[in-house]
């Protein structure tokens, strides 16, 4: 859909921003660069293959039937329409940089009403890529693509599980009883863990408990980077919900009935065939093919694994007019590693991306002239070393990790649900004000570059001993807001954090 995003009567030349992908960072850019906030000569285009994007943090809850499909979707077309942004539902197939006249275009393939492919060139002054990732080894391991359900694209994951459930219900109707199911999840990361718990919650009653859940993990323990206390809590949760964890295994092949695995332990030649009726492939992130295509087409810098290489400003190492955020990029910084592939980093990079895209174009109120919008004025993104990890259990409880401390109970799920809904509500057009697309005076542009969950430390806080007791409680009477306040106070004050952790560790040892 096209919008009059740029005012033709303006004396300033039109500047064009193209956003490739509707990821967690880009939806924040769309909202901020709405028709009221942005200068009249700034034209913004969003390109995505789908008209909606799934919020990854809520998908396991959707699989568990704690959310509907609609509740985990950000409607990109509606959000773009609200913001007065051009939305193109199509596939990006390349970029072109003309060294002679400086012309830069994104190559897009669309489908017309008759199903014919149409190619378009979308000009840009700055382009940003937020396309996420694909599932590792899904197209490499024999049989994986044919027989398993991939976690990406996320929308297909949910629909495939719904289809399999429909087939199970049909068999129940015909046979009058369930033969059960053997679900195997390949991948021992957070996604695999949550999906194993989600499938238990979704199908256990349907199959009258005739359901086995097996998680295949390539490491020796689940989430090896967590503290022993957190890993112990996770082990207890997996045992509670009847998930069998098989460690140190690599998948060699998938057939219609078995997962062929081998041990990755040194000097071991153990091979095994694990039977299954349904298999979900949750092996982690692999670079999107578009990254490789852009590397081969125009020399865009990528890592040896295909991640778009950017500096601390989220700006391409090879093409200054290209930015990237989220899973698809790798931040090259000699002083620290690029953050792991997790949605929280895409969310946190959104405000930084807003600043730098507009500063690059000189379209930010903080830049007095276009000449000021240079490399030195771009804002650096410093990913946090640790973050609150929340794993839903599918039954209205959740397991969390923060500061090396395990958190568990109904209150942890309520906290996760609150945080996720708070983020999603930001992009629901029903909650957004009506803007005048014809607004002409944008001389003092101010973009919203705050983090969505910004917190100000309180003057009075809970005593350290009481705070420690609260965080370790697992009963249903805990008020999640109070516990969340404690965690945020610990983030804001290093001394207070150390005091609370000292009390926590004392309780755990006792």
Image (spheres, helix red, strand yellow):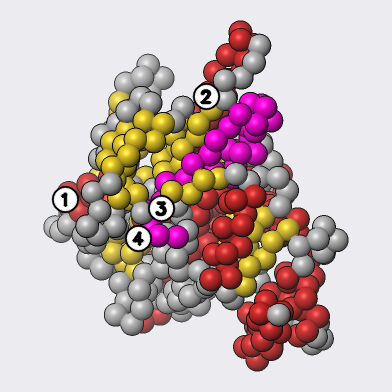
CA–CA distance between discs 2 and 4? Answer: 34 Å
Q: CA distance from mark 4 to mark 3?
A: 29 Å
Q: Nearer the viewer, residue 304 or 254?
A: 254
At 46% across and 73% down in the image, what residue appears? 383
- Residue carrying label 4: 329
Q: Position of residue 124 (x, y in %)?
A: 33, 53
Neighbour tally class for label 3: few under 14, some 14-19, many 20 plus, Cα within 10 Å: some
In the structure shown, which secondary structural element does the residue marked by tag 4 occupy? strand
Between disc 4 and disc 3, whose residue precedes?
3
Q: Which residue is mark 1?
A: 296
Residue that mark 3 sits on: 247
> Left or right: where does residue 155 sit relative to residue 266?
right
Question: Does residue 499 appear in this view?
Answer: yes
Question: Which stretch appears magenta?
Answer: 195-221
Distance between the alpha carbons at the discs numbered 1 and 4: 16 Å
**Quarter of the image where the C terminus is located:** bottom right
Distance between the alpha carbons at the discs numbered 1 and 3: 38 Å
């Amino acid at each position: 859909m096209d919008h009059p995003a740029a005012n033709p009567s303006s004396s300033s030349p039109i500047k064009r921003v193209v956003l490739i992908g509707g990821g967690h960072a880009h939806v924040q850019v769309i909202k901020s660069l709405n028709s009221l906030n942005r200068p009249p000569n700034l034209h913004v285009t969003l390109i995505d293959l789908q008209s909606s994007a799934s919020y990854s943090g809520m998908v396991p809850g959707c699989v568990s039937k704690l959310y509907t499909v609609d509740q985990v979707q950000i409607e990109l077309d509606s959000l773009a329409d609200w913001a007065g942004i051009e939305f193109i539902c199509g596939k990006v197939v390349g970029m072109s940089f003309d060294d002679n006249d400086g012309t830069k275009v994104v190559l897009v393939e669309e489908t017309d009403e008759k199903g014919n492919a149409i190619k378009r060139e979308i000009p840009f002054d700055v382009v940003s890529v937020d396309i996420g990732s694909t599932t590792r080894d899904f197209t490499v391991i024999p049989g994986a693509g044919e027989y398993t359900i991939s976690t990406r694209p996320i929308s297909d994951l949910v629909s495939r599980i719904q289809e399999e459930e429909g087939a199970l219900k049909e068999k129940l109707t015909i046979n009058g009883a369930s033969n059960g199911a053997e679900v195997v999840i390949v991948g021992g990361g957070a996604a695999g863990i949550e999906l194993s718990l989600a499938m238990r919650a979704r199908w256990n009653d349907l199959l009258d408990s005739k359901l086995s859940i097996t998680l295949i993990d390539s490491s020796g323990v689940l989430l090896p980077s967590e503290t022993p206390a957190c890993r112990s809590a996770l082990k207890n949760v997996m045992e509670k919900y009847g998930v069998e964890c098989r460690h140190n295994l690599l998948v060699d092949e998938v057939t219609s009935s078995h997962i062929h695995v081998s041990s990755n332990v040194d000097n071991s030649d153990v091979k095994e065939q694990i039977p299954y009726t349904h298999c979900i492939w949750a092996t982690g992130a692999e670079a999107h093919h578009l990254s490789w295509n852009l590397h081969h087409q125009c020399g865009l810098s990528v890592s040896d694994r295909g991640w778009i290489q950017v500096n601390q400003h989220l700006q391409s190492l090879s093409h200054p007019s290209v930015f990237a955020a989220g899973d698809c990029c790798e931040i090259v910084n000699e002083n620290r590693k690029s953050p792991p592939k997790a949605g929280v980093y895409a969310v946190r990079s959104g405000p930084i991306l807003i600043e730098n895209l507009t500063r690059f174009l000189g379209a930010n109120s903080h830049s007095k002239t276009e000449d000021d919008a240079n490399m030195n004025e771009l804002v650096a993104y410093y990913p946090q070393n640790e973050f609150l990890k929340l794993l839903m259990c599918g039954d209205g409880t959740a397991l969390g990790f923060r500061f090396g401390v395990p958190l568990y109970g109904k209150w942890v799920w309520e906290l996760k649900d609150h945080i996720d809904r708070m983020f999603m509500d930001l992009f629901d057009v029903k909650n957004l004000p009506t803007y005048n697309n014809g607004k002409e005076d944008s001389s003092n542009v101010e973009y919203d570059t705050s983090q969505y969950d910004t917190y100000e430390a309180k003057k009075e806080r809970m005593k350290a001993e009481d705070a420690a007791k609260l965080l370790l409680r697992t009963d249903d009477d805990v008020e999640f807001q109070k516990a969340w306040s404690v965690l945020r106070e610990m983030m804001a004050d290093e001394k207070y954090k150390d005091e609370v952790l000292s009390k926590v560790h004392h309780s755990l040892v006792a």
